[in-house]
Amino acid sequence: MNTPADDGNNNLRYAEYVLGVLDADTRAAVAHEVETIDEAAVAVALWQKRLMPLAETIEDVKPAAYVWARIHDALQFDAPVRSAPRKGLWDNLALWHWLGMGASAVAVALLVVMALPRQTTTPTPTVISAGYMAATIQQDNGSTGWTATMDLQNARMVVVPATPVAFAQGREPELWLIPAGGKPISVGMIALDKATTIALDPATLAKLGPTAALAVSVEPIGGSPTGQPTGAVIGKGAIGAAADSRTKVASATVARTDRMSV
Amino acid sequence: MSVSTPAERDELNQLLVQSGRGDQKAFAELYKRTSSKLFGVCLRMLRDRGEAEEVLQETYTTVWRRAASFDPGKASAITWLVTLSRNKAIDRLRQHREELLDDPLKLEEAPDDQPSPAADAESSQEYRRLELCLDELEPQQQNSVREAFFTGATYNELATRCKVPLGTMKSWIRRSLMQLRTCLDQ
């Protein structure tokens, strides 16, 4: 396998690079060689093949579900990949906004799941999956502030403003999850004028359920400094299952959302 | 997740090739099968869950973007993936090198990386060969190579941890690497 050119100091540097013992500058220099010189790339590949099997002894550790949600969002994938029928709509802000404007939480979730077989030529009624929860956040003035839909499988929540009350300069809405009989848990800052997607960590995810509620409080920019609400609570909503598991919706609804989802 | 049999390796290769063609479903499956291994690698090096999660995210977004350049004729997918995650983790370590130089972790306190008998039974042929060659090295040198691989430490850091002069550490590792190559390429 070895050629004379393979030997000597250069080869040693490539081995050191693969093992990972070089300092930042030398590392960068070798990385540049790998990109630009074929021989370097070949030598490094050989060392990788020799040494990487050591990684087999490292214990596997399952990453939290929200890491995949973040990757998925960062790459702007058009749908939660592992559930084939859902395509495109999750990231369609216009649709979210439209849903948030007038629809009840149940209707929102229903539409989301319903509208998804976009690629089928004939819209067919679809069975609702149980992987969603939703909440409508009602304000004291009686109007809906936001609609929140939680995608449990992909560990994330979309919060869409409907008609939120005005906020003073230097104040922002913060969303809280309130477990039954528990203290509020910060879910994150939400926007007044556009949909906010929030990755849910496992601890938050575990507390979502029909006994929990969402609330929005008025906080300084960046969020409550104490970890608990410090300003007025301006809206609340119970969390419900997004839809009955066997509900069917007329195809007219599908047609309508299809038009919205370009 | 196991990636030690040739059939499993082929499947991963296939998934990575499909990812390179823009197949999101294949990419999701690839993540499902390999993320625990790569997260273990990142966590072992960075020793901080939040940082390891960030590096894992960076790794897979890079995987998606570079998958088209993967050539199964040159490397197996798992080698390619582990390499990528290690490179990202090492880059991250070098970014805060100063903080970590004071790290009190010593060689003798490091977790035992000797494979358990169970791990041995599940391990690949390549790994077993490497292990045989590592066993031929002097114990100190063998430990230095393992420590270097698992923690991503620089020569300087390794020398400090093992309380030997920098020159000694360099010659231990360099000699080990050359011996390993001779042994593995036989």
Image (cartoon, coloured by chain):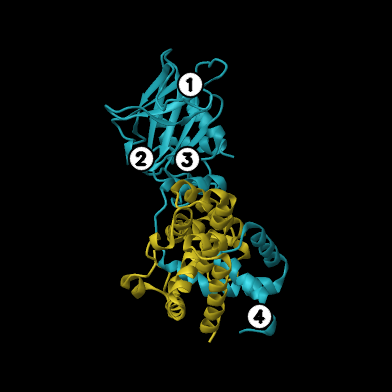
Chain colours: A cyan, B yellow
Residue ID at (50%, 67%): B78
Q: Position of residue A229 (x, y in %)?
A: 41, 22
Tell me the chain of label 4: A
Whether residues under marks 1 and 4 lie with C-beta atoms below 8 angstroms apart, the answer is no
Label 2, label 4: how far apart the Cα atoms are: 53 Å
Secondary structure beneath dot 4 equals: loop
The answer for which chain carries disc 1 is A
Q: Give the residue drawn at x 43%, y 34%.
A: A149
Cα distance, mark 3 to mark 1? 36 Å
Q: Nearer the viewer, mark 1 or mark 4?
A: 4
Task: Report x, y in % for residue A172.
Answer: 52, 22
Q: Is there one chain holding both mark 1 and mark 4?
A: yes
Say which residue label 4 marks: A7
Are discs 2 and 3 located on one and the same chain? yes
Could you tell me how far apart the alpha carbons at marks 4 and 3 are, in whole angstroms?
A: 62 Å
Residue type, numbered disc 4? Asp
Separation of marks 2 and 1 at Cα, in angstroms: 23 Å
Q: Is residue A127 visible?
A: yes
Crowdedness near tag 4: few (<14), some (14–19) or many (≥20) residues, C-alpha within 10 Å: few
Towards the viewer: B153 or A262 = B153
Mark 1 highlights which residue? Answer: A219
| Mark 2 touches mark 1? (CB < 8 Å) | no
**Name of the residue lying farthest toward the right:** A36
Q: Chain of mark 3?
A: A
Indicate which disc, 2 or 4, sits on the residue closer to the N terminus.
4
Q: Which residue occupies 50% across, 20% down? A: A163
Circle on res. A115: 3
| SS assignment at label 2 | helix
At label 1, the amino acid type is Glu
Give, as a three-letter code, the residue at label 3: Ala
Report the quarter where the C terminus of chain A lies: top right
B46 relative position to A2: left or right: left
